[in-house]
Amino acid sequence: MTQSWVHQAIGKIEADFQRSADTHLIKLDLPAIAGIDIYLKDESTHPTGSLKHRLARSLFLYALCNGWIDKDTPIIEASSGSTAVSEAYFARLLGLPFIAVMPRSTARRKIEQIEFYGGRCHFVAHSSEIYAESTRLAAELGGHYMDQFTYAERATDWRGNNNIANAIFEQMQKEPHPIPRWIVMSPGTGGTSATIGRYLKYQCLPSKLCVVDPENSVFYDYFQHRDNSLQSQSSSRIEGIGRPRVEPSFIPGVIDTMIKIPDTAAIAAIHWLEQQIGRKTGASTGTNLFGALLLAAKMKQAGDTGSIVTLICDPGERYLDTYYNPDWITEHIGCCQAMTDKLTAFNHSGELTL
Ligand SMILES: *Cc1c(COP(=O)(O)O)cnc(C)c1O
């Protein structure tokens, strides 16, 4: 272990953090639910374009401080998505080789982004093979398998220290309802919801955590019945969230409630959001937002006021040929018109149900 190299590496990540600003909290303007304020924490504006920038930074610091990474240690990760892009960025910052183990079917755009940051893509035939192949490759190369699905929940300091929950509460300080009634998040690794949920408990905050799950994911059923052997045959169509197995990083005990959101609702929601804020987002943001709007409609019905915070997880420009392509939506998700109609009606009535 080269102590000075590890110290330099930590210093480089800390300096990168010092150069960065936190992400914006965007407030929606929705007269139909006057007195209920909805906010979106815009995680798409990180240097590598998603909330995985936070996770990648935490995973590298955790691995460095654990003595798992040294000068020239190849970094291996099982990911077909945003995590590999963000980890490739940090590996380049430290001058380490990076290999993403991903299914051969991974979108060309993602591969290009990983390669842009100097990473290499190693393909397997089926997505279920990525875990074992990452372990094998790490052993063969003397590398370190980051394993986001195991370590996401523990690599981030959940007590505070600039984590995402900490930032949300600071940014809410001057709002009419500074303590949100609900924070809404969808799980991929489950790391972000674990951080938020633990923070709420540790700080003795009254805010509740609602976790929203897409179709073809086992998290919702696991939350209801706590059977961690659950498996789903098909994979999630909402990139970044929903898993076919119960990931170790998903912590059900910190969650107050879960809602299963249809994928058609998520797609309708991102197109609705574009009309509200003039921006395109990824589909997991649609899952989050539809959940937040359902909770807002319930609050209105009960005559309550207050605030709800959720996340923009990544930008829509990554998905122009999928979630923003009507032909792709028809073929892969189905008709979203019923959900679009519900959201249009919500604009006038403030009412929304599934
Ligand atoms: C990873 C990810 C999520 C889920 O975040 P976790 O902290 O892993 O649960 C949501 N949306 C996108 C686009 C992601 O990449």
Image (cartoon, rainbow, N blue to C red):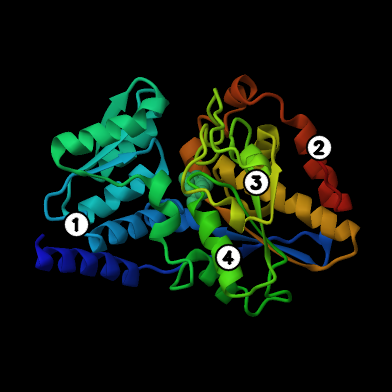
Q: Disc 4, disc 1: CB below 8 Å? A: no
Q: Which residue is mark 4?
A: 25
Note whether residue 70 is visible: yes
Q: In the rendered view, would you say 246 is above or below 289? A: above
Q: In the rendered view, would you say 124 is above or below 66? A: above
Q: Which residue is mark 2?
A: 341
Foreground label between 3 and 2: 3
Q: Disc 3, disc 2: CB below 8 Å? A: no
Q: Which residue is mark 3?
A: 212
Q: At 52% across and 36% down in the image, what residue appears?
A: 243
Q: Residues within 10 Å of mark 3 (few under 14, many from 20)?
A: many
Label 4 to label 2, Cα distance in Å? Answer: 27 Å
Q: Position of residue 226 (x, y in %)?
A: 61, 42
For mark 2, give the secondary structure: helix
Q: Quadrant of residue 101?
A: top left
Disc number for residue 94: 1
